[in-house]
Amino acid sequence: MAEQTTSGGHLSAVLSPEDEAGQQRFDAIIEQDSRIEPRDWMPEAYRKSLTRQMSQHAHSEIIGMQPEANWITRAPSLKRKSILIAKVQDEAGHGLYLYSSTETLGTDRDTLNDQLMSGRAKYSSIFNYPARTWADMGAIGWLVDGAAIANQVPLCRASYGPYGRAMVRICKEESFHQRQGFEILLELANGTEAQKKMAQDAIDRFYAPALMMFGPSDNDSPNSKQSMAWNVKRFSNDDLRQRFVGMIAEQVKVLGLTLPDPELRYDEETGQWIHMELDWDEFNRVIKGGGPCNSQRMARRREAHEEGAWVREAASAYARKQQMKEQVA
Amino acid sequence: MSAPSSQTTDHSLDSFGDATASATRVTPGNALRPEDIALQDTAPATEAIAQYALRLGDDALVYSQRMAHWVSRAPELEEDIALGNITLDQLGHARSFLTYAGKKWDKTEDDLAYWREEEEFTSVHLVEQPNGDFAETIVRALFLGIYQHMVYTRLLESSDETLSAIAAKALKEVDYHLEHAELWTLRLGSGTEESARRMRRALEKLWPYVDELFQDEPLHDELEGIAPRPSTLREEWTARLTEILERAELSVPEVPFAMAYGRRGEHSEHLGYILAEMQVLARKHPGATW
Ligand SMILES: [Fe+2]
Ligand SMILES: [Fe+2]
């Protein structure tokens, strides 16, 4: 979607005096790297851009529950089952928390949900890949939650207050998610031949999609520049990606497994990690709905929502009746 | 390539944070964990106590396995969290009871969950029933919630210290499960015409499996002072249920009880599928740890 890329919010040529004062205050807050709160004046473009980013994030938490929920009933030990349920439940909590934060920008949850159901809103494309084996629970935790953390830690300082605070809380739990994923892989890596193979296979499948979670190179993204100017985004996609690669390149050694990247190396000169070319055609295809599981994920979400309609109606009918009773009493 | 030792990498993993942190847990955490019970010296003193713990464990395990299916499919996001909580709590109770029971036979919770055959399970038919629609899930939660609440309350006075400790922790959580079931019973019972109709249908569908909850077994003769006789719970259970149903503009249905003997290994047709799914991966890799 095309977005205003010049300095924040000069959408119309003529600003009212209130808007002008607001814009000045807003610019000053950004300049001081301090926080915009819901009641503060903000440029429409800022509001719109954050609403989009935060709701996409919320949708990703919700859709992201599905591939992991897929393994709860088959988890191979009761302890793992318990940890996995807790994790998936955390993601629901993240979604809820992020929807509430997004609502402070003026769009309600039902509207955001409609945008997801109708396919107008996006969610992280990683969740359109299937979780085929138990080892995928490990790879998802380690790589997918891991990439999410790398992305989100800088967002804890995002200029929009409610978003930054949501990120602080969420990052704490994501750390636990990454840890349990790593532990799953570690256990498999030290297990039988079959288990070890399962672990390697999961890493092989999730490595590239996880790297693509950081998004295409910023050179191709006008949104990135604006987002940085607004102190929402702090580092470029490529920079976050190479840092993440560096981290997992070390951690994979603990597992005694490998990353499927023959080009992976640390470049002393630039202090950067170099990785293989990523298949952005595949990325775009998945984003547009052509991933292995897009249709399945959306169908499940819609089904749950539609089948729950009578329940939600009953709850509000009951609440109305209670209210009437209280008024009479 | 910079190469920190595995030690450092491990530390960086430690810094990821507290493994018990969760924003969504609304019920008590780690008071008495199955891991603690596994470490205790005390095994159940008698076979009857072990068998009794096995029954409570199997009910909670199969119920949790059923409830797990709701995760990511609930009518609203708040319910996803609530139902997930119940699933997780029940699994926790199952793990504690199974761990304790297993100590009598030198078996772990996983030995009992993954490597017993269907006829060795002792769950009641009620927990084996499919989730159905949300109304069925709520009616079952209400039946079971009142029952578990009563059983665990009685176990607080058990002369078996481990049973009473597990029950004490479970009770705080079941308290919440029951509150949740009760609230939804009221909402659905006196919500819309459709929700009331679905609740009546759910009550009729599940009522047949109520009787089994209150059947005494020879086992209970040996549990004087340790565990309540199921038959002694029936009256209060029925009174509590009737009271809630009345408030929800519902009533106890008039349908016959089913012949159900899960306690002696004669299960519903559903359990085979439930176990097949639960055990498939573990059984594919005998001897593996996870
Ligand atoms: Fe999350
Ligand atoms: Fe996560």
Image: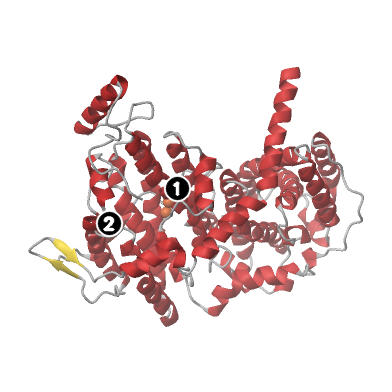
Q: Chain of mark 1?
A: A
List x then y, in percent, for residue B252. Answer: 87, 45
Q: Residue at x 33, y 38 (%)?
A: A45
Residue at screen point 47% across, 68% down: A131
The residue drawn where x is 63% and y is 57% is B64
Q: Position of residue A88 (x, y in %)?
A: 50, 55
| Disc marking residue A32 | none
Q: Callout 2: 10 Å neighbours few (<14), some, many (20+)? A: few
Q: Residues within 10 Å of mark 1 (few under 14, many from 20)?
A: many
C-alpha distance separating marks 1 and 2: 30 Å
Q: Quick check: marks 1 and 2 in contact, CB under 8 Å?
A: no
For residue B73, say whether it is visible.
no
Secondary element at image label 2:
helix
Compared across the picture, whether A40 is left or right of B270 comes to left
Which residue type carries mark 2? His
Name which residue type carries label 1.
Answer: Ala
Horizontal relation, residue B224 to residue B174: left or right = right
Q: Position of residue A116 (x, y in %)?
A: 50, 51
Q: Which of the numbered marks, if any, corresponds to residue B11?
A: 2
Residue A321 versus residue B147: which sits nearer the camera? A321
Residue B45 vertical placement versus B229 (above, below)? below
Q: Which residue is mark 1?
A: A58
Q: Do circles 1 and 2 both sit on a common chain?
A: no
Task: Give the image quarter of residue A124.
Answer: bottom left
Q: Quadrant of residue A139?
A: bottom left
Secondary structure type for disc 1 = helix
For the C terminus of chain A, give its image quadrant: top right
Q: Nearer the viewer, residue B89 or B248?
A: B248
Chain letter of the residue carrying label 2: B
- Seen at 38% across and 26% down, the residue is A39
Q: Nearer the viewer, mark 1 or mark 2?
A: 1
- The residue positioned farthest toward the bottom in the image shown: A193
